[in-house]
Image: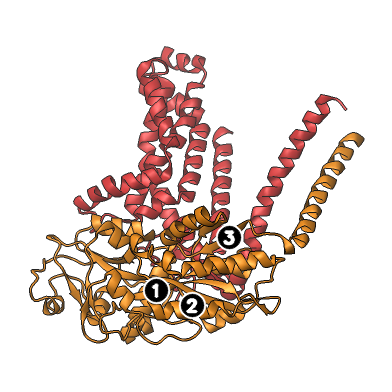
Chain colours: A orange, B red
Amino acid sequence: MKKFQLLFTAVIAVALMASCGNAGKDKAASNEKAKTITGAGATFPQPFYNKIFKSYTKEKGLLVTYGGIGSGGGIRSLKDKIVDFGASDAFLNDKKLADMPGEVLHVPTCLGAVVAAYNLPGKPELKFTPELMEGVFMGKITNWSDAKIAAVNPDVKLPDMEITVVYRSDGSGTTFIFSDYMSKVSAEWKEKIGAGKALKWPVGIGAKGNPGVAGTISQTEGAIGYIGSEYAFAMGIPVASIQNKAGNFIHPSVESVSASAKGEMPADTRVSLTNTDAVDGYPISSFTWLILYKEQNYNDRSADQAAQTIKLIEWVVSPEAQKETTKVHYAPLPEAAVAKAKAVLNKVTYNGKALK
Amino acid sequence: MNSEKIFKYLLVGSGILMVLIALGIVATLFVGSIPSFKEFGFGFLFSTEWDPTEGRETYGALPFIIGTLLTSILALIITFPFAFSISLFLGEYFKNGALPSFLRSVVDLLAGIPSVVYGLWGFYALKPLVAELGLNAQGFGIFTSSVILAIMIIPYASSLGAEVISMVPGSLKEAAYSLGATRFEVVKNVIVPNAGSGIFAGYILALGRAIGETMAVTMLIGNSNNMPSGIFDLGNTMASLIANQFGEAEGLKYTSLIEIGLILFVITGIVNYIGKLIMKKLSA
């Protein structure tokens, strides 16, 4: 028994020593060279990030890892100070910014959109006004043969078929962008449903992820749902043109999504692009952001770690990385947005001193 | 210190560790759900409102408790005739031979298939069939999920049953035959009363599995957070709701989901406890 206790004590002691040893190493790390840069967050831009971080690792020899754990998880990870940067599809509002332990900066990296995809016999090309979107997604228009749909689409022969709305069952930035748009164009939507990553849906079927929604739509005749444009473009799913604020019906494409960002942009880049003023812009578009602390000395990070993080993010908005966006069906940042992003990065400090 | 003692301590140690882990899980769930409990109290259990809209957030667990119980109990009812037949077939009628061993492997294989594969099959084969039969418009819903669950839990419900049926003493059966009993009468009057508690234990195991199943259900139930109006309506279960919503949840929603996890844990515990009680009664 005695010996056993001795063994047990020894094991505990070794474990304690090991953990102390670790803590000691962290302290000494402030002068160390960065080995890996870690980020986590939004799944929506993940194909883009995976692609460019992989080539960055290959070219610069610095390992960049990105965990697609969702925007909420990305914000939490940054709040817990366990990542070098987070990523989010929705910018942090003033309340959330105040909740963070330090000042947080937003850097836009690319643009995406949310499209209305549907399954109708003959794959007709449909046009939607904001009023039609409201009617269909709130369950007020329940049949494809409804006169209101026909009025906007006079050239299309619409079947007498029940409309099945398909939405995201999981919390998602895609749902946020979609509902943010709907809240802007429909007072009733804003009042009854609102904007958020998950909603209380009056009608329809919930499916998990873009693949789930796309799969359910393709399996269900008469279905309509919203999915991330990058997914819809890659899969070639039929999507609706949507009437923007200027009154033009805009088909979602890399060009029309990029065009939505033409307007004025605040210095901190926190701007919602839905229902854009741009005459040729697709109205359900959005930036996606990387988020990081303005003061980079936290959690015993080294100066080099901070410098490498900024170098990486600078590279993300560089032409070299931006030209990769369209290959994975996102839209590149317009030049004005790149300039704003660089200005944001210039504010970053380490121990209060500017990094650049 | 001899090896005998070391072995004993290892056993005791792992036993205690298991208990600690179980208690740790309960404690984590409990602490995590305190904020939600403070906000909603016991009303959480009976509220049908699940509204995540910022500014008027309200969460209630009733639609998901009902969804979980409906899908799993319906699954158990659907699976019963099949599982019982398989148990009898393998445990009594054909114990050895090529066909029974083939059947046994197939049933075991069912237990090994990942639930997402069941979900895919349900999505592409079962759902269109349900829609075709006109049971509901799109083929999604509680009934479809129950059918998939029923197939998934057959191995759990049947294996244990086959095992205990084959262990019914031959002398008892022979005695019944010698009194002129037919095979059906032997099954009815000797085997079922003798093996009852074991067969029942299999069903409790199966029910526990059905209650906790997540992926296949998520893909088929329609994920509607409103109260289901019947077994052909859309719905959602506790496990499926947590899997869907936890990733992006924060604040009140986060803790409400943890409370749902706690309720799921408690319901599973209750089911197991009731199972044990009935088993005791049957075997006494």
- Mark sitting on residue A38: 3
Secondary structure under tag 1 reads loop
Closest to the camera, between mark 2 and mark 3, is: 2
Residue type at mark 3: give it.
Answer: Thr
Q: Where in the figure is residue A310, as x and y percent of width and height? A: 57, 69
* Quadrant of the image occupied by residue B6: top right
Residue type at mark 2: give it.
Answer: Ala
Q: Which residue is more in the foreground, B115 or A43?
A: A43
Which residue corresponds to the image point at 39% horizontal and 63% vertical from the top-left? A169
Whether pointer 1 and pointer 2 mark residues with C-beta atoms closer than 8 Å, the reply is: yes
In space, the residues marked 1 and 2 are separated at their CA atoms by: 10 Å
Q: Where in the figure is residue A260, as x and y percent of width and height? A: 32, 79
Q: Is residue A4 above or below residue B133?
A: above
Q: Which residue is mark 2?
A: A341
Q: Where in the figure is residue A116, as x and y percent of width and height? A: 27, 69
* Mark 1 Cα shell of 10 Å, populated few (<14), some (14-19), many (≥20): many
Tell me, yes or no, if residue B281 can be seen here: yes
